[in-house]
Amino acid sequence: MTVTLTKLYEILSLKIGKQEVETLTTYIEEKISVDFADSKNNIVAEIKLEIEKSRTETERALRSQLWVIIALFLPLYVTITFALINLLKHP
């Protein structure tokens, strides 16, 4: 059964009085608002943590790929450089 805050107010005001019901419904509204804000902040914090973790993993993967590229092309670069030096010395 779904009860809206307005319906709750109407039902309870007949039994416990308008002032008490206003206090109760105000408390409920504030509690829901605070709980929602807390939940939203927790979700945002979790998302930020996951993004940071993903960014760190991506950076680590890119660094390792860069080292692989350097390791593959450095010997080729050195070989070409020495070949060009030898060609320039002995035409």
Image (cartoon, rainbow, N blue to C red):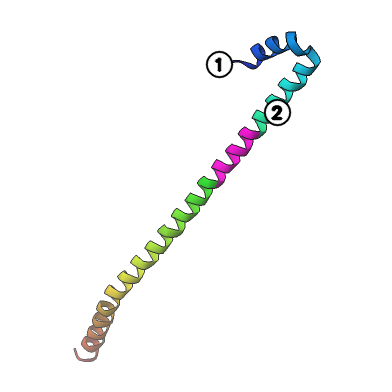
Instruction: Please determine whether, in this image, residue 64 is positioned above or below residue 81.
Output: above
Residue situated in front as seen by the camera: 62 or 51: 51
Q: Nearer the viewer, mark 1 or mark 2?
A: 1
Outermost residue toward the right? 19
Q: Reply yes or no: does residue 37 show up in magenta.
A: yes
What range of the chain is rendered magenta?
Answer: 35-45
Outermost residue toward the front? 15
Residue drawn at (41%, 58%) of the image = 58
Crowdedness near tag 2: few (<14), some (14–19) or many (≥20) residues, C-alpha within 10 Å: few
Residue drawn at (70%, 13%) of the image = 9
Assign a secondary structure to mark 1: loop
Which quadrant is the N terminus positioned in?
top right
Q: Is residue 64 left or right of residue 50?
A: left
Assign a secondary structure to mark 2: helix
* Residue 25, x across and y down, in percent: 71, 20
The span from disc 1 to disc 2 (Cα, nearest Å) is 19 Å
Kindly identify which numbered label has been placed on residue 2. Answer: 1
Instruction: Please determine whether, in this image, residue 5 is positioned above or below residue 79.
Output: above
Residue drawn at (78%, 12%) of the image = 18
Q: Which residue is mark 2?
A: 30
Q: Amino acid at mark 1?
A: Thr
Q: Is residue 85 left or right of residue 19?
A: left
* Residue 54, x across and y down, in percent: 44, 54
Q: Amino acid at mark 2?
A: Glu
Residue 43's image quarter?
top right
